[in-house]
Image (cartoon, rainbow, N blue to C red):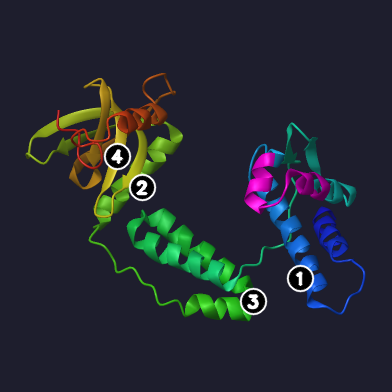
């Protein structure tokens, strides 16, 4: 029922006086596309101001106010008001999305590039998601995607490294501390207990950004140099000065410091 509101609103956008010229038809199509994009933008954020929406849609804020009012009048559950911002009421769904040929190709390219570099679970999820998307695409868009002449050869990540990547990714998401052995570029071995903050891909290696509890500071560890790994039952909470945001601010403040991008964890 709710999803039908968008279709009604889009139909209303096209319900302009009949005209045999192509200009009117173009205006009708542009308004319909803009209303659909407006719904998508509002759905994708907790709160969207009219200024933000106008910039993204390349229209005036007055046009945004008018479009939002039209959608609300057709029953689309947009909450908020001018000068404050807009959000979509929870539980609202749109009909299945359609993609242009270029968008379909971009999705396929992203999966081809990412899949051999991801951990096993995410790689399988990417393949499954792509299959679902391709299965509902119009024939022309699907053919364009499948004819994409862009490929990403497999990288030399062995199975144990990809399994460690998954363990560390999940530990970071679930806020579990981890312990592991580490061998740095000088072949020096150390034991670490860290708060995993995030995994970063640098084109050749994956690294773990973490707060090291034993060295009391941020460290970055190459995942291919991590040895025995144990995910602890102990969880951690974000604390000032120990979060990923804190680490990123520190890196931005000193971008040329040694090891800021790929290799730390040597001390």
Q: Give the residue number, with chain letter if any, for mark 2.
A: 166
Q: Quadrant of the N terminus?
A: bottom right
Task: Report if the CB atoms under discs 2 and 3 are less than 8 Å apart.
Answer: no
Q: Is residue 164 left or right of residue 31?
A: left
Inspect the magenta stretch and tell me whether residue 263 lies in it: no
Q: Is residue 49 left or right of residue 262?
A: right
N-terminal of the pair, mark 2 or mark 4, is 2
Q: Quadrant of the C terminus?
A: top left
**Nearer to us in this view, 233 or 50:** 50
Quarter location, residue 7: bottom right
Total marks placed: 4
Task: Compute the Cα span from label 2 to label 4.
Answer: 11 Å
Residue for badge 3: 138
Q: Is residue 31 above or below residue 135?
A: above
Residue at image coords 37%, 29%: 249
Marks 2 and 3, how far apart at CA: 35 Å
Query: What is the C-alpha distance between the residues marked 1 and 2?
Result: 49 Å
Q: Secondary structure at mark 4?
A: strand
Q: CA distance from mark 3 to mark 1?
A: 22 Å
In the picture of the structure, the residue carrying the numbered disc 4 is 208
Callout 1: SS: helix
């Amino acid at each position: 029922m709710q999803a039908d509101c968008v279709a009604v609103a889009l139909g209303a956008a096209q319900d302009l006086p009949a005209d045999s010229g192509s200009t009117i038809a173009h205006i009708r199509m542009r308004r319909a596309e803009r209303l659909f994009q407006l719904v998508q933008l509002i759905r994708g954020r907790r709160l969207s101001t009219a200024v933000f929406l106008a910039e993204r849609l390349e229209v005036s804020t007055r046009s945004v106010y008018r479009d939002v009012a039209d959608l609300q009048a057709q029953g689309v559950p947009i909450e908020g008001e001018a000068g404050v911002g807009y959000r979509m009421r929870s539980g609202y769904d749109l009909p299945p999305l359609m993609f242009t040929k270029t968008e379909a190709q971009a999705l396929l390219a992203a999966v081809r590039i990412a899949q051999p570099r991801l951990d096993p679970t995410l790689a399988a999820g990417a393949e499954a998601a792509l299959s679902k998307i391709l299965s509902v695409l119009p024939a022309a868009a699907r053919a364009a995607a499948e004819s994409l002449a862009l490929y990403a050869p497999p990288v030399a990540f062995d199975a144990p490294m990809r399994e460690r990547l998954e363990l560390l990714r999940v530990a970071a998401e679930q806020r579990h501390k981890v312990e592991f052995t580490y061998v740095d570029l000088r072949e020096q071995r150390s034991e670490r207990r860290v708060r995993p903050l995030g995994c970063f891909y640098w084109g050749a290696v994956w690294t773990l950004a973490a707060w090291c509890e034993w060295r009391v500071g941020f460290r970055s560890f190459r995942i291919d140099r991590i040895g025995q790994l144990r995910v602890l039952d102990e969880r951690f909470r974000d604390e000032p000065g120990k979060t990923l945001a804190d680490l990123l601010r520190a890196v931005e403040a000193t971008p040329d410091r040694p090891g800021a991008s790929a290799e730390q964890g040597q001390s």
